[in-house]
Amino acid sequence: MKRLTAVVIGALALAAAPQDGKRELRYAFTKGDTFPYALKYAMGVRVDKVPEIFQGVLPEDLLDLKMEGLLDVKVTEVAADGSATLEGTWKKLTAKGHMLVNDIDFKFDADKKEEKAAKKEPAAPADPALDGVLNLEDQLARAVATSLVLTADALGRLKVKESGAKSQEIEGIFRSLNGMMGALPQEKIGKGDGWKDTTKVTIPAAAGSSVDVPIATENLYAADEDVKGGSCAVLTSKFKVGQVEKKKNDENNVFNAQFKTAGEGEGKTWFNVKQGRATRTQSLLKVRVNAVFPNPGGGDDIELNATVKMEQNGEIGK
């Protein structure tokens, strides 16, 4: 009898499992669900040589920034197609480093009133177009004071609906719940299967401007691995940087710079199929930027060559 029971249970388990070994990777959102979302983000920008006009004013390492944040996320709406509206409340956010000539040392903890209230008064920028570039701490203070509202589709793509930051440097982090990988595959996949996608990252560029850089991703279902007590599909990614599309009168291209971009990177996502979410993500990207922009003092255009390094890690759930 015991043997017969074991056979029946085994048969039922086999019937429930995908017979071809392929699985559908989809986010499963339920209205009212809550979960913590932890982020680590680092960016560095180093120029090969500071142009003569800026020597003695700007350092070679134009930007060196490390950020860590923790959001309490609630699913407020779920549509018929599986997409959802997510409302995140900042619990913690720290940022340390420097941007251009400004040092950055920001710390917010919602559970500590003295830190919640602490905020430097922003200095007025010489050019209003640079607000948020020169005053990142002010942007962060605005961000933590307001809920972050996102829309997420079933493949993990994100869009910012509402944010107190109003800064591409901050909002550009929230492209995908899968890190820099972009979207999950449209079709069912099994171990050894791959798919391609395109996404974007936001990087600082010449003289305080920022641009969206296209990224082509090649992804692979590489293995299965237990993470935080749950079985996850391990998805590995290779990134290739594309060419920035130059747009006339782009408000984010305040110096009318022309860009050439190249580079590569890699990432890894651990996706819990049963829970319907990415448990952990890791991404690293290096972008080579060539920027040419008009000389504000007249004369020949200024050329700047730099390397942008970005690293982003995320964890969903405790």
Image (cartoon, rainbow, N blue to C red):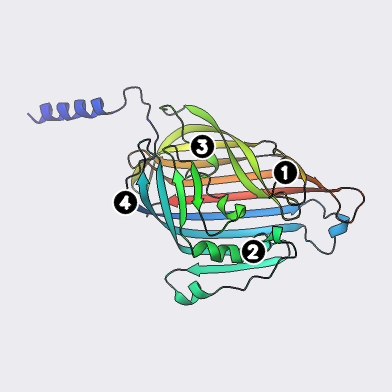
Marks 2/1 in contact by CB < 8 Å: the verdict is no
- Which residue is depicted at the point 40% across and 34% down? 25
Q: Give the secondary structure at mark 2.
A: strand
Pick whichever, 120 or 248, lies toward us. Answer: 248
At which x and y percent is residue 1? 7, 28
At which x and y percent is residue 168? 61, 52
Foreground mark, 2 or 4, reads 4
Against 183, is 8 above or below? above
Marks 2/3 in contact by CB < 8 Å: the verdict is no
Quadrant where the C terminus sits is bottom left
- Which residue is depicted at the point 50% across and 28% down? 194
Marks 1/4 in contact by CB < 8 Å: the verdict is no
Give the Cα distance between marks 3 and 4. 31 Å
Image-based side of 218 in relation to 274, left or right: right
* Circle on res. 32: 4
Q: Give the secondary structure at mark 3.
A: strand
What residue would you read off at disc 3?
236
Number of other residues with Cα within 10 Å of mark 3, as a class: few under 14, some 14 to 19, many 20 or more: many
Image-based side of 63 in relation to 41, left or right: right
Image-based side of 249 in relation to 119, left or right: right
Indicate which disc, 1 or 3, sits on the residue closer to the N terminus. 3
Number of other residues with Cα within 10 Å of mark 4, as a class: few under 14, some 14 to 19, many 20 or more: few
Against 272, is 195 above or below? above
Number of other residues with Cα within 10 Å of mark 2, as a class: few under 14, some 14 to 19, many 20 or more: some
Indicate which disc, 3 or 4, sits on the residue closer to the N terminus. 4
Give the Cα distance between marks 1 and 4. 43 Å
What residue would you read off at disc 2?
97
* Circle on res. 288: 1
- Which residue is depicted at the point 25% across and 28% down? 16
Foreground mark, 2 or 3, reads 2
Give the Cα distance between marks 2 and 1. 21 Å
Residue type at numbered disc 4:
Gly
